[in-house]
Image (spheres, rainbow, N blue to C red):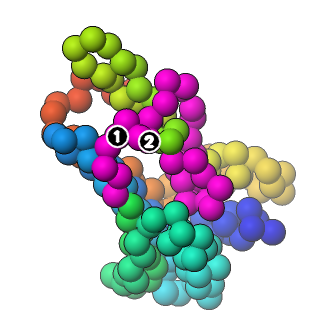
Amino acid sequence: IFILLVFCILLSGCVKSTTTTTISNNKNVNLNFELLISDKFKKNINDFVDKDALIKRGFTITDTSKDGYTGYTINKKFDNIDTISSAEDKKIVISDILKSEFDDSILYQVNKSFFKNTYVANYRYRLASMASQNSNIETDVKEDLSSESQYIFKVELPYPVISSNSSI
């Protein structure tokens, strides 16, 4: 039911999601999510976010409203990127980060070397797989699903990016 509800929200174009990761010179990491639902939509953001579970995991949550959308800004600060990195390459669905059972220690893959470490974020949105779960939806709707809502992922770094394989 939850997946169907999320799918209906996505199709109605009433969700805005901005995820920002800021990494500082001293290896501090700030992870910020802004999750907004259109005020025209009859569901409340509380139906999609387990505030108590996030607070237990160390997130701070503030109410946010702008341009006819209401929701939350969800933030968590980490003292050192190495505490949320592992050598294992994991593909992470961004929405899974907000689940109560998510393991923060796998947010990044670290490739350690003598002079410097390289950190990799292998993040994904799971829009197409949600659409494919419902065979009653026409193909052109499935293909246009990602354009129906706004999903933004930002990375702010203290140094220039070495390489990127991000795509739209």
Q: Quadrant of residue 155?
A: top left
Q: Which residues are magenta?
A: 77-104
The residue closer to the viewer here, 70 or 156, is 156
Q: Is residue 94 one of those drawn in magenta?
A: yes
Percent coordinates x, y for residue 49 in the rendering: 58, 73
Q: Is residue 46 one of those drawn in magenta?
A: no
Percent coordinates x, y for residue 47 in the rendering: 64, 79
Residue 81 seen in the figure: yes
Residue 16 seen in the figure: no
Which residue is denoted by mark 2 in the rendering? 84
Crowd around label 1: few <14 · some 14–19 · many ≥20 (10 Å): many
Q: Is residue 140 left or right of residue 85?
A: right
Residue at figure coordinates x 49%, y 24% from the top left? 87
In the image, residue 157 sits, relative to residue 17, either above or below, namely above
Identify the image quadrant of the C terminus: top left
Which residue is denoted by mark 1 in the rendering? 81
Identify the image quadrant of the N terminus: bottom right
Residue at figure coordinates x 59%, y 70% from the top left? 53
How many angstroms separate mark 2 from mark 1 (CA)?
A: 5 Å
Crowd around label 2: few <14 · some 14–19 · many ≥20 (10 Å): some
Q: Is residue 7 left or right of residue 51?
A: right
Q: Is residue 123 left or right of residue 154?
A: right
The three-letter amino acid code for the residue at tag 2 is Ile
Q: Dot 1 lies on which element? A: helix
Is mark 2 in CB contact (under 8 Å) with mark 1? yes
In the image, residue 166 sits, relative to residue 46, either above or below, namely above
